[in-house]
Amino acid sequence: MPYLFLRLLPWLVGAVSFFAVEWTWRRPGDYPWALVAALALYLAASVAIGWKRLGPADLATKMLTPAIAFVTLGLAALMAERTEERIALTFFLIVVPGYALDLLFLLTHQPSRYPVNGLSRLNLALVPFSAFCLAVGLVGMQIFIQLEKWIIILAFVLLGAALARLTEHPSAGRVAAGRWTVFGAILGLHVGILSVVLPVGLEVIGALAAIAFAWPLRARRYGYEPKPPRRLAMAETTGATVLYLAILLVSRWA
């Protein structure tokens, strides 16, 4: 029975997340308590599934990034006006916690079915996703309710430090992890400042924040063995640079 219950927990959290999002859409005055309840259930389910199989630090490293992504999705929900935006947010608010818990269950209870580095890859993919949602949510709040700029900058500093630490390579030592945490905070500081001063739309700011976070943390991978091919590094660098410049050059400025 305990095994079956743990196996069903990812689905249960996904279902609760769905009802929490629907409640939020239908009763916006209750925001954000339904989403907070779903997040609390996700964290409790993470502990229930992984506590006996993983150490506290390892469990936190694997499961906190989806929690951060869930929070940023909740912030982005404040700016959702169109039906398609709400559908997309509902989808991700269900899939992110549910899929992360499913991977955790496979890792701890069915390791033969666990995809290699599944949670690490998911967490790295959630880095630009979280940066985009945070930018849209907080900058939107600055526009509509005059949120203080220092709060936005501080939020990006904390996000950068947290994501840089949580997505660190497993073989990195304490010194390297500490350096990347500081780098992440500095990166967040720069992105936060750009977010509050650039006179562009929310989607543009979100896209710039996503690229600014994704590329340096992806480039960190080239410092560890086995290193990706040099051609891949050149292609990724060129692609990120062209995309970043293209967004700046073709976007509509205020």
Image: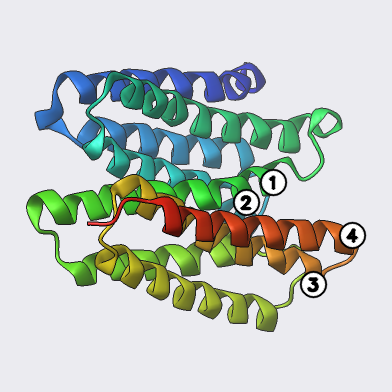
Write the residue at 22% across / 57% down: 254
Q: Of the residues tagged 1 and 4, which is closer to the observer?
A: 4
Taking depth in this image into account, of 155 and 144 the one nearest to the observer is 144
Question: The residue under label 4 is which amino acid type?
Answer: Pro
Classed neighbour count for the residue bearing mark 2: other residues with Cα under 10 Å, few (<14), some (14–19), many (≥20):
some
Question: The residue under label 3 is which amino acid type?
Answer: Gly
Q: Which residue is mark 4?
A: 229
User: Left or right: where does residue 218 sit relative to residue 15?
Assistant: right
Taking depth in this image into account, of 220 and 170 the one nearest to the observer is 220
Q: Residue 124 — which label?
A: 2
**Which one is earlier in the sequence, the residue at label 1 or at label 3?**
1
Write the residue at 79% across / 72% down: 223
Question: The residue under label 1 is which amino acid type?
Answer: Arg
Between the residue at mark 1 and the residue at mark 2, the CA separation in whole angstroms equals: 5 Å
Q: Which residue is mark 3?
A: 223
Between the residue at mark 2 and the residue at mark 4, the CA separation in whole angstroms equals: 19 Å
